[in-house]
Image (tube, helix red, strand yellow):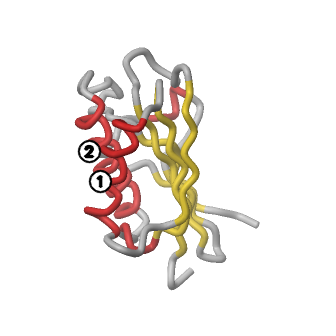
Amino acid sequence: MSHDIINPATLHDPTGFGYSHVARTPGGLVFIAGQYASDPQGNVTSDDFAEQVDRSLANLGTALAAADLGYADVVQLRTHIVDHDTDKLAVLSTRIERIWGTRPPTQTLTGVAALALPGMLFEVDAIAVASRP
């Protein structure tokens, strides 16, 4: 089965890190790679956790839009939080509710010691379903 790879020009070029941002299958499944608080050059944009969550979710929206999808098409999130605690969970929960309201997608949250790049505190990847393959 062949699939399309999409790397939006407004996100950093991920190929130097060995991945692509979006993979869209002919059956309508869309896989979004881990999005973090990156600028167009791939640099972490802030050392503030809440700002990183906001930027990561905005980058997720950009990746979804590149596949002609939106947040409502997301069926699963996987979130990764460095040094996870209840305060960080509260920040994430607020942002999830702001975007998805009372119908959030499924989510698995993993607390981790570190992520791929220095300064990263949060990362989110997603699976979405396109209504038209």
Q: Secondary structure at mark 2?
A: helix
Front-most of 98 and 26? 98
Query: What is the quadrant of the N terminus in the image?
Result: bottom right
Q: Position of residue 14 (x, y in %)?
A: 47, 35
- Residue 54's label in the rendered image is 2
Tell which residue pokes out farthest to the top in this image. Answer: 118
Q: Residue at x 55, y 49 (%)?
A: 78
Q: Position of residue 15 (x, y in %)?
A: 52, 33
123 lies above or below 132: above
- Mark 1 or mark 2: which comes first in sequence? 2
Q: Secondary structure at mark 1?
A: helix
Whether the residues at callouts 1 and 2 have beta carbons within 8 Å, the answer is yes
30 lies above or below 47: below
- The amino acid beneath tag 1 is Arg
Q: Residue at x 28, y 50 (%)?
A: 58
Q: Position of residue 76 (x, y in %)?
A: 55, 62
Nearer the observer: mark 1 or 2; the answer is 1
- CA gap, disc 1 and disc 2: 7 Å
Within the image, what quadrant is residue 29 found in? bottom right
* Direction from residue 91 to residue 128 in the image, left or right: right
Crowding near the residue tagged with mark 1, few <14, some 14–19, many ≥20 C-alpha atoms within 10 Å: some
Tell which residue pokes out farthest to the front in this image. Answer: 86
Query: What is the quadrant of the C terminus in the image?
Result: bottom right
Q: Residue at x 59, y 75 (%)?
A: 28
Front-most of 75 and 21? 75
* Direction from residue 92 to residue 130 in the image, left or right: right
Crowding near the residue tagged with mark 2, few <14, some 14–19, many ≥20 C-alpha atoms within 10 Å: some
- Residue 95's label in the rendered image is 1
* Direction from residue 46 to residue 1 in the image, left or right: right
- The amino acid beneath tag 2 is Asp
